[in-house]
Image (tube, rainbow, N blue to C red):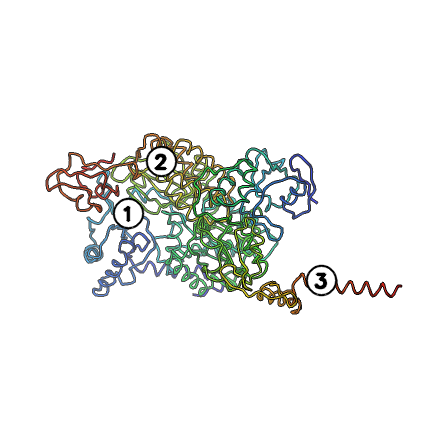
Amino acid sequence: MVNLIINDKAVKAEKGEMLLAVIRRMGIDIPALCQHEAVEPTGNCRLCMVEITKKDWDGWKRCVTSCLYPVEEGLIVETHNPKLHDIRRTLFDLQLANCPNSEVIQKIAAEYGVYKTSFEVQPDGDNCIMCYACTRICEILGKSAISATQRGHNKVIAPPFGEEPPDCIGCLACAHICPTFHITWHDEGGVRVIWNKKFELLTCRQCGKKTITRDFAEYLVEKRNIPRDYFDTCDDCKRQETARKFGSVVIAAGEASL
Amino acid sequence: MFLDSIDKLSAWQKDCRKKSEAHKVKVQICLGPGCLAAGADLILKEFEKVFKKHKIKDVPLESIKKTGCHGFCSRGPLVVIEPKGIFYGKVKAADVAEIVEKTLINGEIVERLLYTDPDNNKTYTDWKEIPFYARQTRISLRNVGQIDPDNIEDYIARGGYAALAKVLKSMTSSQVIDEVTKSGLRGRGGAGFSTGKKWATAAKAEDTPHYVICNGDEGDPGAFMDRCIMEGDPHSVLEGMIICAFAVGSQQGFIYVREEYPLAVVNLQKAIEIAREHGLLGENIMGSGLSFDIKISRGGGAFVCGESSALMRSVAGEIGEPRAKYIRSVLKGLYDKPTVLNNVETFATIPVIMDKGAAWFSAIGTKRSTGTKAFSLAGKVRNTGLIEVPMGTSLREIIYDIGGGILDNRKFKAVQTGGPSGGCLPENKLDLPVDFDTLTENGSMMGSGGMIVMDDRTCMVDVARYFLNFLVEESCGKCVPCREGLFQLHKLCEKVCAGKAFEEDLKLMEDLSRVIVTASLCGLGQSGPNPFLSTIMYFREEYLAHIKDKKCPGGVCRDLISYVINDDCNGCMACLRVCPVNAISGSKKQKHVIDQVLCDRCGSCYAVCNFEAIDIV
């Protein structure tokens, strides 16, 4: 165990834990847009910055991203002070200029008193805040179908060469993890389109509803050892089937006991 | 000669020296980047042609030496004839026959090619006496411009690999680290971290294997020190790396070079192969038991890949983006293993420290910044080129004594040190000693050693805008403050240049800069606002002139200036012909007039006028 002080309170933490986890556990609210428990932290959004010091640092303080900073014995952490507030406000201010239409950003920025950006609004600004959550989850799935390309302000998340991503399986992990709902898809007529790639959707044998993409099912069969016939029916029908089976067992047992 | 034991080196060195002394006269042709651009390859060809045609007594074809950068770029192409050190500048292919006939055959000097000091009209024959060279102390550049980089025997003859032999024969790895630590050597890449401490941490790291990487990703506009070392003296870098490998217990090294330095890649590759052939790299180096090899890793030329963690990711084949370094790369670097990353110049300095000792090295320079530092002197200075001076030398000495003062006798305005993310220092800082700490304290930084001199016709807001633009383009785009913050800072700077900014914008720029500095992930962002911060610190009145008076004092910002023809105009029509938008009218021998509505403010007329008849107002 490691002992540290966060906002004047003594806390214990597991060795190797990151500061942000400890701070959140204490019920302290600090914003973090690129952090997600499913993926490794990267420190892109900088919102979770905290100020740290130690007794023997002679008053020297340092701002670090808490999502990436491992707990240390004797660390003294401040999560809210004028300097950090200023940093967060400026970051929201910049994000508002970059993603003028994102409701998620507008809402959190308003919590910090930023309602209108001080900077030049990007007219072609989309909702992507370049948090890399999508590319990180895609990498965990072993696909890396999309990645961050270009540099600086021109950086975009895109499939290789901006073409249909050959490795994408249409699983929607990227779209579901996206904190600002930037990544979109649509299902129509048994076809799913995401990243400009078309996928065939499987049909439930019982109710005829569309389920997941064939490529995703193949992936699960191969990588997660799920039996192929598992994908013959949809989740709803599977649930009904389970209920039916369970019911008949109960009824049968009830009759026997009578 | 294959060196299977350390003792064989000294015999080889004797051989090499004998061979080198056998040619009494050496014709050294500088093939550094500056001279090459000015046509040095044509001169080389011409020399070879003349030598093949005529047999010259005592001067065989082998006396022609292709060297790396000799240093005095503004006088290039350079031809130096040793041992007398006769220094010919601005040589043309047509001059070669005369040089051969007069100097090589008759022993005379071709006066018109010599260097004349414009201040006192003194002419110099020997390059070592020219003030540009005489005031330098060359350690990392000791062989650059003096040897043929492809010929290991040249390097050996000048004492090359002797330091390695000394280390392998008589020192332990901790003695090597002690010596480097005692020398006070600080990393020449810019951050100035103690090299000895870095090595000591890596040597102690338990995880294996250990890697050694040489950072040759010199990306600052106007900097070419590392390039010249890699091109002109590759073996000194290899020797430094092998010594480091011995000290920290590494078997694999990498040199990260940008693809934009093709000659550096070729010369390093050749040097590595030659070193392997002679038993200086690979298994069991010089029979000492040390095994170490070096691979070249070519970068795509991203500025951010000079940052340690981005560089290591790039070497590993990933996207060149930095990571947070709360765990230092010396413990968890390339492939998450302990890694020593040093700059080209640092490695090139190591053999000299090993050879002459820490005490000798630390006696040069200042107490906290020991030794010498190489700079590429560029911009509006008379003598541009590659220089090396002891730490603590003042900016004035560098710019006026070595650099010869400002071009066209104009007034000095600022000097930018430390590359795009460095800072601009004004005239009252000219007497500052150049060392790591003083530059940082004054809002600039050492950086890798680029030095750009600016005269009174430079607009400091425009300079800030230019460098911010560079950083916006080179930001990797991973973290918000750097990607969005520098982008907006640059936009605001453009607004000032266009005369559309208000005083409140300066406050916004200062506040934004403060956040970018504290909140950015890597060094690029943390030092990114420096072009703005240092210019606003020393040249605030110029910003205010743009904002309040809508004037550009430097006469640069297009939206705030106009070109006007004065009464000195004699109607030569030169400007009229050159104007791309036909905004100038007037007939021959009559004063011309510029139509301010049509004028695009490109400055072509100003540049072409020989009579100072065009004013910028």
Gap in angstroms between the C-alphas marked 2 and 3: 68 Å
In the rendering, at what x and y percent does residue B339 appear? 54, 53
> From this viewpoint, which residue is outermost toward the left?
B589
Gap in angstroms between the C-alphas marked 2 and 1: 39 Å
Dot 2 and dot 3 residues touching (CB under 8 Å): no
- Give above or below for B65 relative to B515: below
Q: Amino acid at mark 3?
A: Gln
In the rendering, at what x and y percent does residue A168 appear? 53, 62
Disc 3 crowd, CA 10 A, few/some/many (<14, 14-19, 20+): few
Q: What is the chain identity of the residue bearing mark 3?
A: A
Disc 2 crowd, CA 10 A, few/some/many (<14, 14-19, 20+): some
Disc 2 designates what residue?
A: B500
At x 28%, y 42%, the residue is B382
Q: Which of A126/B593 is in front?
A: A126
Q: Amino acid at mark 2?
A: Lys
Gap in angstroms between the C-alphas marked 1 and 3: 85 Å
Residue A123 is marked as none
Is label 1 on the same chain as label 3?
no
Q: What is the chain identity of the residue bearing mark 2?
A: B
Disc 1 designates what residue?
A: B74
Name the side, left or right, on which A218 lies relative to B148: right
Residue A75 shows in the view? yes
Dot 1 and dot 3 residues touching (CB under 8 Å): no
Q: In which quadrant is the C terminus of chain B drawn? A: top left
- Give above or below for B8 relative to B343: below
Sequence-first disc among 2 and 1: 1
Residue A240 is marked as 3
In the rendering, at what x and y percent does residue A6 appear? 65, 38
> From this viewpoint, which residue is outermost toward the right?
A258
Q: Amino acid at mark 1?
A: Ser
At x 53%, y 54%, the residue is A183
Asked where in the image residue B21 lies, by quadrant, the reply is bottom left
